[in-house]
Amino acid sequence: MRCGLAGLLTTIITVLADDLVVLKHGSLKGHRLTSRKGREIFAFQGVPYAKPPVRELRFKPPQPVEPWTGVLDATKEAPVCVQRGFLPSDIEVRGQEDCLYLNVYTPRVTLLLRPSYPVLFPFLLFWWIIVCGVWVIGVLGASFLSTEDAECPGNNGMKDQVAALRWVRDNIAEFGGNPNSVTIFGESAGGSSTHLHMLSPASKGLFHRAISQSGIVLSPWALTPPGSPKLVAEQVADVFNCPVQSSSELISCLRKQDAYKLYSAELLIPVSSASDSLTLAQSEFSN
């Protein structure tokens, strides 16, 4: 009887721990934040939603995250993906390749008192569950760099976003969210991404409302014309003296290059893009 009572008390204490969430891949330990208006928010930061896109996974679609043991510390922001500043004069490269993480902010995660909050992806409103995702961009995201064949079809940044939305569908209920009430939101390039998800069957059923602000699928940064991604891939390969006759050899060579140098290579080629476009030529993202 004592063992049974102790087990019951342990279960109740675990359930009432607002900053501890148990997912199918493992447990998360978050922390509490206070808004500028003094409201308490529970934050779970640096939560992995896919395997790190490094080494052999560079240029590949996101792979499912592997389970972990113990309790994962989700109290700190994960590093940003490899990138440089927005202004042309800011050429310093920062971030890291292992960056497929997201943050969850919720007013409450207590299981015994769990309401079913709507979910907003990715900005913050009180009394919503907020999920902010990060995805690989630029050359490493294979957005405007692609061999336009099965070796590197491209659009991995968009596929990262789909993987994050699948994570929301599969896990957000454990944070008190409603997987059947998900709103995606994006501004500028994010607005174009939002519009693309509205049109793509790959995102079907993963969200229920969308807000596209200052960006649509017809925006000049949204699409890359056919042929351009492959040309960019060959020009980046030339920077590193990689072979271009074979797509597999080209991508294999680029996988061996330093991430910062690879990202910086776009500054050295005559044909490039300042945005993270969806490759117009390829159709597998829309199937």
Image (spheres, rainbow, N blue to C red):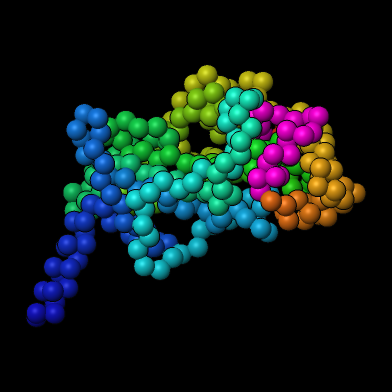
Residue beneath the point at 75% across and 42% down: 146
Q: Position of residue 61 (x, y in %)?
A: 63, 50
Visible in this render: residue 173? no
What span is in magenta?
Answer: 259-278
Q: Is residue 31 left or right of residue 248?
A: left
Relative to 213, say whether 265 is above or below: below
Q: Is residue 244 left or right of residue 39?
A: right
Q: Position of residue 194 (x, y in %)?
A: 53, 30
The question of residue 266 being in magenta is answered with: yes
Outermost residue, right direction?
A: 245
Residue 125: image quadrant is: top left
Q: Is residue 226 left or right of residue 260?
A: right
Q: Quadrant of the C terminus?
A: top right
Residue 227: image quadrant is: top right
Residue beneath the point at 18% across and 49% down: 113
Q: Position of residue 149 (x, y in %)?
A: 79, 46
